[in-house]
Structures are given as structure tokens and as C-alpha cells.
Image (tube, rainbow, N blue to C red):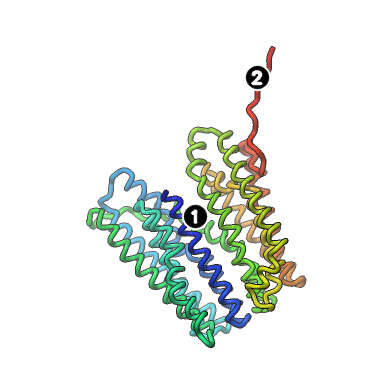
Amino acid sequence: MKFLLSIGSRYLALIIQFCLVLLITSTLPQSEAGLYFAIFGVVTTLFALPGFGLPDGLVKTLGNEIALSRTAGVRATVARAICLSAFTAAALAAAGASAMMAMGLSWTFAVLGALWYFFVSMGFVVSQAFVTVRAEVAGSFFFYSSINIFLLMTSVPYLLLSATPSLIGLLVLTTVAASLSFVTAIFVLLWRLRAFPGTASSVPLRPAIRIGWVIALSRMLQQMIYWIPVWVTTIWLTVADAAIIGAAGRLLIAVSGVIAALRFSVRPSIVAAAAKGDRRAIEDLGRRISLLTFLFTICAMLGCWAVGRPILGLLFTPDYAPVWSLLLVFIVGALGEAFGGPVDEVLRMTGKGHVALIGLIATILLEATLAMIFVPGGIAAVAWAQAIAFWVMYAGQVLYVAKRYGILIMPLPRRQPIKAQRT
């Protein structure tokens, strides 16, 4: 039940984000919408960096202490981790604000963008603290749904009711929503921590950082894949083009969200099978997920091709007409992700996380290079850089797992057991 609640919490956030995208594209000028998507991409890419991976690492190190009933240092450790993360988040936010002003953006825009980043990243830190103390549902809610619920109470009414909505006004209310979500999460976490002894001792943080920095870096790189087309378009084409490709990328979450939910939900099963050395079980599970996500993405692509243009024509203004064709290209890329199923999770859960990380770095370099090469062809060509990068990354991982473990994960039915031959 708790996993269903977590997935439901995530999709509530996606629905609100979908509505917000529609309002932004219909009420703000394209130039302002493009800037919004560009800063949104930065926030959602760098949110896991505060604490240098400490929040992710604590899930394992402090989680192990709790599992062994050594709970005396839980309160103090969580408090230290949040303080260190807040310090690094503030430093990153200040650096980001300075960079934005150096690029010629107004100090108001830079400060609001920095505050938005600070509160979103700290919301992630607190959400990981919830996961650490075995409150996974609360962690999922405060990271995915909480801020979006506050956006529903602030930014959405502003865009709906204001006679002249502006980007600055939207950023103010977005920052307010992020701060309210963070403050609420902190109070709930303090209440949750009352169950643990209030001692001054704490668990060392360095082991958590050693474990967590790889996870944090992987989170950042995974998000960058989705936002490189927006950033390249903003720099090399126009901000109005960035608004169009950004809107198409945000619509992709209707497909990629389903794929991610199915892939991440099988991690415990992969761990259990790997612990038993049951490679056939890993392959069968991987093939089922791959086949399911591949067929779902094919249906999404066919549906978008058949009825997407008239539906999106009703939802968006004529200036956003290219969104339909761009979304089709992005779904082609999502088809590559679906083709590999949970192959990257197999790598991470079988001790080959460094292979997945190297693959992400290579994918980012490939996508950025292709995007800049394709810029003269316009935003449609830039979108193809993302699609190609996804296919190359997951095809490479499928080949590696097949060669390393003899496990072939593709959209195929499970292998039939080999019958003994009669003599």
C-alpha cells in the first residue's frame, strides 16, 4: 500500500505540473515562458547537490543504524546533516545568482531563482531524512506533491486570475510555495524525530558522503538529459524556441513518469534475485518490465500521432504549434528508455553502479555535442539529439549486461526452460 501511495503522490504532482505548463504557455509571453523553463531545468537538475550526496548516503548509513536498533544518535545526525546541506545549498544558490547576473539577467530574477533553488533543494534534503527514518510515504509526499499543492494554491490562481501575469510575479509565488513546503516538512520531521532518543551523540557523516555523492551525481546527470535541449535552444536559438521545446519536454512526463514508476518499483525484486544469484529471475523480470513499458510507449506514440495535434491545438496557443511534432520526437527517445526496461537498475543493484554512471556521463556529452551540431536545423533537430542519446545509452547498457551476466533484457517474452533431452 505504501508504494501505491508513493506512486499516487508522484502522479498528483505530475498532474499539477501539467496544468501549470498549460497556464504558463497560455498567459506568459514566449520569451518569459522560455526563461521560466530554463531556470526550472536548472533547479530540477541541481537539487540533489547540497550536502555533496549526504542526504542520499544517510538513507543507507543511518538507515543501517536504525535497522540494528542503534537509534541514540538519530536526532543529532539528522540535524547535522540538514545544517551542512543548508550551508552548501546557500552557497550554490549564491553562486547561481551571481552567474545569472553575469549573464545579464536582472538581480531580481537572479535572487528569486536562487531562493527557488534553495527551498526546493532543502525540501529534497528533508524528504531524504524522512526516508532515512523509515517514513518513505512522507518523504515521497514532501518531495513530489507538497510543493505542487502549494503551487496549486499560489501560482495557479495567480496565472488564472491576474489580468497581467508576469514572470517575476510567477517566480515570487513559486518561491513562496517552495518555502511553505520546506517549512511544513521541517515541522513534520521534528514531530517524527520525537520517537528517537534526544542525545548529543551522532553518526559520522563522511561514510554517508562517500556513498551518496555518486547517487547525487547520477541524479543530476539523469535530469540533464531532459533539459539539455532547452538550454542549448536558449543559448543558440531564441528564448521563444526554448519555451516551445520546454513545453514539449514537460508533456513527456506523461510517458516517462509511467516508465520510471515501473522501473523503480522493481528494485527490491532485483536485489533479492541478485542476492540469490538467480540471473534467470532478473532476466525474466527485466523482460516483463521492458515489454510492458515498450508497448505502453508505442501506444503513447501512436496516440500522439493520431490525435495529438488537434488535442494540443486546443490546449496551446498557435505559437506553440510545433509542440506536437517535438513531443513525437521525445517519445521516440522514451521508446529507447522503455526498450532497456530496468537495465540501469540491474547495474546499480548488482554492484555495477559505476558503469551506469559512466554511461550517463557519456550520454550527456553525446547529447550536448549532437544538440550543438544540430542547432542549424532548428528545434526539431535539437530534440532528435535527446532521442538519439537515450537509444545509445540504453542499447549500450543492454549489451553490457548481456555480455557481463548473460542476461538479455529487451521487450521479449521470458525464456522457456530447456527441456531435458531423452537418451
Q: Nearer the viewer, residue 375 or 340?
A: 340
Estimate how packed mark 1 is, as few (under 14), some (14 to 19) or many (20 or more) residues with alpha carbons within 10 Å: many
Quadrant into which the C terminus falls = top right
Mark pair 1, 2: CA separation: 44 Å
What is the residue that sits farthest to the right in this orientation?
377
Q: Nearer the viewer, residue 72 or 332?
A: 332
Which tag, 1 or 2, sits closer to the chain's start?
A: 1
207 sits to left or right of 12: left
Image location of residue 415, percent across then percent down = 64, 33
Q: Residue at x 36, y 49 (%)?
A: 63
Image location of residue 16, percent across then percent down = 51, 67
Q: To which residue does mark 1 refer?
A: 215
Height in image: 26 above or below 307? below
Image location of residue 299, percent across then percent down = 67, 54
Height in image: 29 above or below 401? below
Amino acid marked by disc 1 = Ile
What is the residue that sits farthest to the bottom in this orientation?
164
Q: Quarter-wise, where is residue 247 in the image?
A: bottom right
Amino acid marked by disc 2 = Ala
Q: To which residue does mark 2 refer?
A: 420
Q: Nearer the viewer, residue 192 or 206?
A: 192
Q: Residue at x 41, y 50 (%)?
A: 2
Image location of residue 73, percent across then percent down = 27, 53
The tally of labels here is 2
In the rendered structure, find residue 355 and report the number of the disc placed on it: none
- Regarding residue 366, the answer to whether it shows in the image is no
